[in-house]
Amino acid sequence: MKKKKNILRSHVLEWKGCYQMSTQEKKWIEAFRLGVVPKNLPPSLQILYDNVFTQISRDLKELSDDGGIVRWICGPYGSGKTLLSKQIQQFAKRNGFVTSSFSLSDGLKLHHLDHWYYGTLHHLSAQINMQEVKSFHELFNQWIQSLRSQDNVEDSTKLIKEMLENLNFHHHSFSHALNQYIRARLQKDIALATACASWLSGEREVPQHIKEKLEVKGSVSKENSLEFFQGFMTLIKWLSFRGMVLIIDEAELLLRARSDLRQRAYENIRQMIDWVYDGTLPNLSIIWLTTPELLENQEKGISTYDALAQRIQLLDWQKRENIHSSSCILSLHQIGEKEIDTLANEIVSIYCTGYSFSCPVQPKSIGNWALLHLKQDGVVHPFLTVRRFVQQMIKILDIIRENPTQRYYQTELERSSYNGTHLFTNK
């Protein structure tokens, strides 16, 4: 009887694993159907814009102990910038970096450096022992747990003391609050530790009586945000990370800001670039995602702030001169024929797994049917975006799955090129 139970349990676990896998695949398709890039990017889709990804991954691998990089990734809406940024973020985490990724659409204002710090600390993500951590609290708690598991208490105490002394060099309040946080964690005072983590993360709404208990004053401001940044960057090195990769999306939204605020934002961007390269903020890398408009607009764009334009080699990019793989600005071009077919294979595979569905034609034909419909809508290959292509494929797969008796899409469709345009013929 016991053997039968074990057999039954193994079948249940096998079914549960298949169900979880298909549920995950279905979630990915649901996100792509809406034009949204899922947080946990399917590994099979980490294939696009290999030249840009290869360059940035090489940059991160080759960083010196205190080094950092700044890169701008430029491409039109729907070109796959966010998809690429997820790929970069996952690579960075696998290679020992803390990451932070936020969008200017979140309401963060770059004309205040304290908003940079707040946004960075509230969008943290890292990988520790193959586990995902997503907050300052989780990040530091892992380190505390490792210290508590050590047999030699004196060594752990000495390590904490050395770290706090090093941090105190940058910002006394940061070091002191961290000391209070460590004590609260070791004493299992979760409420106090959480409040302390909030203050360290830039929260302004920490009650006064809590700050008195923590023996700290004020909060992160534009005047002291650099010291907090330095304190945090020093801290993550003590936690045995290689550094931090900060990804800021939708930078083109700066064009909507009031003129004076936009110029202050440009000044702060220029200042952050200088701090990365002059060693003020060691181990920090910043990757910007933007549409071409921010780089091309002569009235509101970066070209209105000469110092920043020079830092990112904007004139070379505008003239398409001296452009190479290590240029500050990396452009995403339209996807090529090879990428179209690879993307079609991966999307059809994910769709079929998620919906337990058998596609009656080859994935390449689904991609060709999608291209044909987009062409009929006036979207030709030079202006094709990843988002539109994926959404059109999913629409066709939905039609086939929900209408199994209709024959329209159930024939193979071949693609050829002539004078820069696609031609299609039924096989």
Image: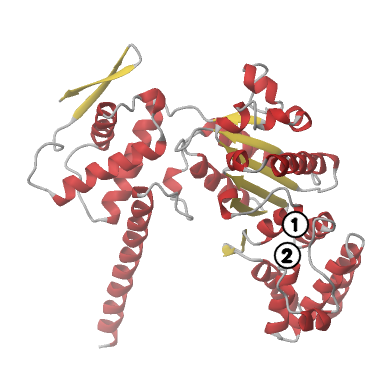
Q: Which of the marked residues, 2 or 1, is nearer the chain's N terminus?
A: 1
The quarter of the image holding the N terminus is: bottom left
Q: Which mark is residue 202?
A: 2
Q: Which residue is drawn at 27% across and 30% down?
A: 377
Are the residues tagged 2 and 1 within 8 Å (C-beta)?
yes
Locate residue 383, reporting x and y percent: 40, 26
Locate residue 180, reporting x and y percent: 81, 78
Q: Eyeballing the image, is 10 above or below 59?
A: below
- Name the residue nearer the viewer: 258 or 344: 258
Circle 1 packing at 10 Å, graded few (<14), some (14-19), many (20+), is many
Q: In this view, does 183 lie to the left or right of 107?
A: right
- Name the residue nearer the viewer: 359 or 86: 86
Q: Which secondary structure, mark 1?
A: helix
Q: Residue at label 1?
A: 114
Give the Cα distance between marks 2 and 1. Answer: 8 Å
Q: Eyeballing the image, is 275 above or below 213?
A: above
Q: Which residue is drawn at 68% across and 77% down?
A: 194
Q: Which secondary structure, mark 2?
A: loop
